[in-house]
Amino acid sequence: MEFEVDLQGVVRLDIERTDGAGRVLARVESLPFDPEDRSVTTACERQLAIESVQQFPVQGSRLISVESGGDRVLATHRFHAVNVPPARVP
């Protein structure tokens, strides 16, 4: 996933993954970034992505600047999974 965002002045960058209702499922802290570049690219392992969308077919992400006064959301992304393989039953 790629976010286009102004990173000037950002010291620490986190990303949250949310479910369809906006509840936080996971947070990754201290993403590497270049403040001169206007984009941040994130990825996860294929199997983790498949298992995640099988459980939560509507998800979102929030790119967050962690600041002394609190978190500031820089960008959001919402997606709906399609053509998801069925979950395996052990």
Image (cartoon, rainbow, N blue to C red):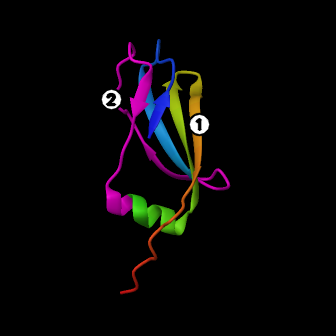
Q: Residue furthest front?
A: 83
Contact flag, marks 2 and 1 (Cβ < 8 Å): no
Mark 2: secondary structure: loop
Q: Which residues are magenta?
A: 19-48
Residue named by callout 1: 76
> Would you call the spot at circle 2 few (<14 residues within 10 Å), some (14-19), or many (20 or more)?
few
Q: Position of residue 60 (x, y in %)?
A: 57, 48
Residue found at x 41% / y 58%: 49
Looking at the rendered image, the disc whose residue lies closer to the viewer, 2 or 1, is 1
Vertical placement of residue 81 versus 17, above or below: below
Task: Work out whether residue 52 or residue 85 is closer to the camera in this orientation and state it.
Answer: 85
In the rendered structure, which disc, 2 or 1, sits on the residue that comes first in sequence?
2
Residue 77 lies in quadrant:
top right
Disc 2 and disc 1: Cα gap in Å?
A: 18 Å
Q: Quadrant of the N terminus?
A: top left
Residue named by callout 2: 32
Q: Position of residue 46 (x, y in %)?
A: 33, 58
Residue found at x 65% / y 50%: 22
Q: Is residue 38 magenta?
A: yes
Instruction: Classify residue 58 as left or right of residue 40.
Output: right
Residue found at x 58% / y 50%: 79
Task: Work out whether residue 8 or residue 42 is closer to the camera in this orientation and state it.
Answer: 42
> Would you call the spot at circle 1 few (<14 residues within 10 Å), some (14-19), or many (20 or more)?
some
